[in-house]
Amino acid sequence: MKNLKVIAVRTSKTIYRDGDKVIKVFDEDFSKADVLNEALNQARVEETGLHIPKIIEVTKIDGKWAIISEYISGKTLAQLMEENPQKTDEYIELLVNLQLEMHSKKAPLLNKLKDKMNRKISESTLDATTRYELHARLEGMPKHNKVCHGDFNPSNIIISENNTPYIIDWSHATQGNASADAARTYLLFCLSGNEDLANQYLDLFCKKSDTAKQYVQQWLPIVAASQLVKGKPEEKEFLMRWTDIADYE
């Protein structure tokens, strides 16, 4: 691995390029079940026909689990947005169109979004009353079975050299309510300090999907609670405010 180019370093994983392949190597203490689940998610989403890198192999390298996939040559949408700020409107529209295309797909064997959210709420450090209110709200939300990415943001979209957009990083994929996925994207923009972009994104998503903004906002306390479980100190105060259901009544 020493001679391979590192293309990204994430929490608990390092991503290398090896010719026309990408090798995602997980830390030694990373859960085997989570590695295999990520590979399985990606394989299941491949079957929908969406443009995503294809899984080639799951293996062990130097005692560490690794997922080997196709390398997609190009730039992330996040890079393009930074390099071409005058094209922001065009890029946000591309982001929304891609997400809506994804939500039009079904992958019946993916884990259910509601089950994942219920588990995250239970694992959070929120007090029992807030957890109860969040569980109750989640239970009351409509049950859908659309493909949801769970981390859909411009850094997880690669525009290839022939201008084809590819969606990467399917570790959080589930099937469920598209508005929960949109709420998560909105939250990610806000966490990165881009509140104006967050609002532009949400307005366009709601317009194109004919969804009431209030409906997406009802998911915000739920997705904020699931983000709290990541335990990032710099996000805690912001997320704690968002988990207050009263703010979204």
Image (cartoon, helix red, strand yellow):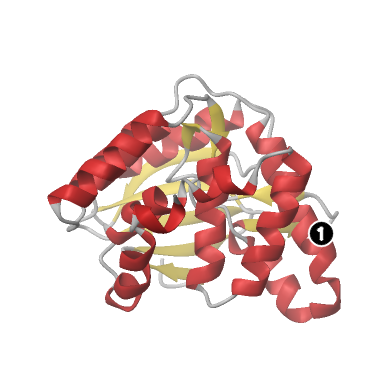
Local crowd size for mark 1, using a 10 Å CA cut-off: few (<14), some (14–19), many (≥20): few
Residue 127 visible at all: yes
Vertical relation: 246 (above or below) 234: above
**146 or 215: nearer the viewer:** 215
**124 or 241: nearer the viewer:** 241
Residue at label 1? 161
Residue 76 visible at all: no
Q: Tag count in the figure? A: 1
Residue at position x 30%, y 35% in the image:
136
Residue at position x 27%, y 60% in the image:
27
> With 93 as the anchor, is 155 left or right in this view?
left
Position in image of residue 78 (x %, y %): 66, 69
Where residue 134 sits, quadrant-wise, is: top left
**11 or 247: nearer the viewer:** 247
Which quadrant, please, contains the N terminus? bottom left
Position in image of residue 115 (x %, y %): 32, 31
> With 36 as the anchor, is 72 left or right in this view?
right
Vertical relation: 85 (above or below) 197: below
Position in image of residue 11 (x %, y %): 34, 66
Q: Secondary structure at mark 1?
A: loop
Residue at position x 14%, y 49% in the image:
128
Position in image of residue 104 (x %, y %): 68, 29
- Look at label 1 and name its amino acid: Glu
Vertical relation: 57 (above or below) 168: above
Residue situated furthest left in the rendering? 128
